[in-house]
Image (tube, rainbow, N blue to C red):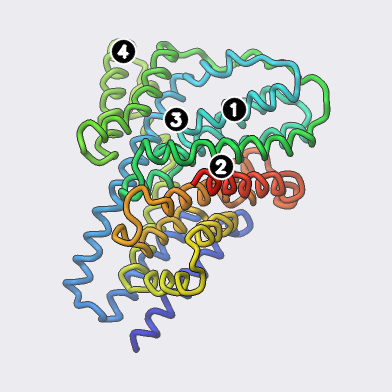
């Protein structure tokens, strides 16, 4: 077969796989399964095309694997830290301090808490915690769903402006497209505006009145829960500083944080027989399917990059749309339909740092648009998929009640970013 046929088959595999990933909620086939299958088939086609020799292809694969393994190790470390906090019921530190009767006041407090919490943890974990909290707080389903839609928007907006708040921002950070303090300075205000405008619109969908008071938490209070919560969060916040002080990649910082927390929990529970609070037991609770999804998607993108497909796409976009802002907006809107992880990975493969250097406004726009654009549709982000799963939300309900607010907030944030530039 000619080189063009192999390239065409790779694009076809990629498109079919993406359609299946997008409709995971209908097919009930785990997206990690599809992503891994896509990756293997695309690399088989890349090796089969013989555009490069087998030795050159192996070298390319090894190089890509070295880069993306940093992201995988970072994710595993961050997920393990969050799980050990959850095992100690550390998040009760937050839930025990919130007891507000006014529905609209509670809506804004929940949003602000989600916005800032997701910048420290990540948008996926924050959404899980906040939806579980709302299920205890709000009895009326329609109101609870509005709150949940707000949580998705706030979590995605809050996660976009820090290197550890959203996996796509983490990818750009690890890839040296952005630096910690630059992205926080550039994106914080647009992200806040996106959140505030969206919540202002959603606020009108809530009825006036009081909410049911929070029930007493039936979950068992674990020893040292408060200590582990504050220590875990502090270690997560320390990771960007670790990179700045040592120059080591971020995954080394997260492994340092994980080892410190592991050491502390081993010491605290060494004589009590509380094996369920120790790290080996907690590691079994990590959502490895999500990690494998990222691995599969990134390997697939690497195959397309090695084949030169992404370079052709970049040239086409540059020739068709001269504005980098417009390209970033297109990527943000596409992330409402297609998962933002592969979109950002593809963008990183299409544009070299020699073309857009570290902390270029282009990368800041990509971080913002990809992070917040996923809120426009419910399956456009991991936070939205979790919300849909936990609350059994109908796709069309989200379109009718939340999508417009998310879309207006998205463009409001872009407008503010352009204004400041």
Callout 4: helix, strand or loop? helix
Q: Quadrant of the N terminus?
A: bottom left
Q: Residue at the left extreme?
A: 55
Name above or below for residue 249 compared with residue 321.
above
| Mark-to-mark CA distance, 4 and 2 | 33 Å
Name above or below for residue 170 compared with residue 96.
below
**Residue at (31%, 13%) from the top-left corner?**
268
Q: Report the disc number at residue 383.
A: 2
- Give the quarter of the image for residue 277: top left
Q: Nearer the viewer, mark 3 or mark 4?
A: 3
**Residue at (32%, 54%) from the top-left corner?**
357
Q: Report the disc number at residue 120.
A: 3
Name above or below for residue 295 compared with residue 79.
below
| Mark-to-mark CA distance, 3 and 2 | 15 Å
Q: Which one is nearer the viewer's eye here, 403 or 323?
A: 323
| Mark-to-mark CA distance, 3 and 4 | 25 Å
Residue 317 rendering spot, x and y as whole percentages? 47, 70
Label 3 vs 4, first from the N-terminus? 3
Callout 1: helix, strand or loop? helix
Q: Report the disc number at residue 268.
A: 4
Label 3 vs 2, first from the N-terminus? 3
Image check: 245 left or right of 178?
left
Residue 391 rendering spot, x and y as whole percentages? 67, 38
Q: Report the disc number at residue 356.
A: none
Q: Nearer the viewer, mark 1 or mark 2?
A: 1
Name above or below for residue 104 compared with residue 415.
above
**Residue at (40%, 57%) from the top-left corner?**
345
Label 3 vs 1, first from the N-terminus? 1
Mark 2 crowd level (few <14, some 14–19, many ≥20, 10 Å Cα): many
Image check: 200 left or right of 346?
right
């Amino acid at each position: 077969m000619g080189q063009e046929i192999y390239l065409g088959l790779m694009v076809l595999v990629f498109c079919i796989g993406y359609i299946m990933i997008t409709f995971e909620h209908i097919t009930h086939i785990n997206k990690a399964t599809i992503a891994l299958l896509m990756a293997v088939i695309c690399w088989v086609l890349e090796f089969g095309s013989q555009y490069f020799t087998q030795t050159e292809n192996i070298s390319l694969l090894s190089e890509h694997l070295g880069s993306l393994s940093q992201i995988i190790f970072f994710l595993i470390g961050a997920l393990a830290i969050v799980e050990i906090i959850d095992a100690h019921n550390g998040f009760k530190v937050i839930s025990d301090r919130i007891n507000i009767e006014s529905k609209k006041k509670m809506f804004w407090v929940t949003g602000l808490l989600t916005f800032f919490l997701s910048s420290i943890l990540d948008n996926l974990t924050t959404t899980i915690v906040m939806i579980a909290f709302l299920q205890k707080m709000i009895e009326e389903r329609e109101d609870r769903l509005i709150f949940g839609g707000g949580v998705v928007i706030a979590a995605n907006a809050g996660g976009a402006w820090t290197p550890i708040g959203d996996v796509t921002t983490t990818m750009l950070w690890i890839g040296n497209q952005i630096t910690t303090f630059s992205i926080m300075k550039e994106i914080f205000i647009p992200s806040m505006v996106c959140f505030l405008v969206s919540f202002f619109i959603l606020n009108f969908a809530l009825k006036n009145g009081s909410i049911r008071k929070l029930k007493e938490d039936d979950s068992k209070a674990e020893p040292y829960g408060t200590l582990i919560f504050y220590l875990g969060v502090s270690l997560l916040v320390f990771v960007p500083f670790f990179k700045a002080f040592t120059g080591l990649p971020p995954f080394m910082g997260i492994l340092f944080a994980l080892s410190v927390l592991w050491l502390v929990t081993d010491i605290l529970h060494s004589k009590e027989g509380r094996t369920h609070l120790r790290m080996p037991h907690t590691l079994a609770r990590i959502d490895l399917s999500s990690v494998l999804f990222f691995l599969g998607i990134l390997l697939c993108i690497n195959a397309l990059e090695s084949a030169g497909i992404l370079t052709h796409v970049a040239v086409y976009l540059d020739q068709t749309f001269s504005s980098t802002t417009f390209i970033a907006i297109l990527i943000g809107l596409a992330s409402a339909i297609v998962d933002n992880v592969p979109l950002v990975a593809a963008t990183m493969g299409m544009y070299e740092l020699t073309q857009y250097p570290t902390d270029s406004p282009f990368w800041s726009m990509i971080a913002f648009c990809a992070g917040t654009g996923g809120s426009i549709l419910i399956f456009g982000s991991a936070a939205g998929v979790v919300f849909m799963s936990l609350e059994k939300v109908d796709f069309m309900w989200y379109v009718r009640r939340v999508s417009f607010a998310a879309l207006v907030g998205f463009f409001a944030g872009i407008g503010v970013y352009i204004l400041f530039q």
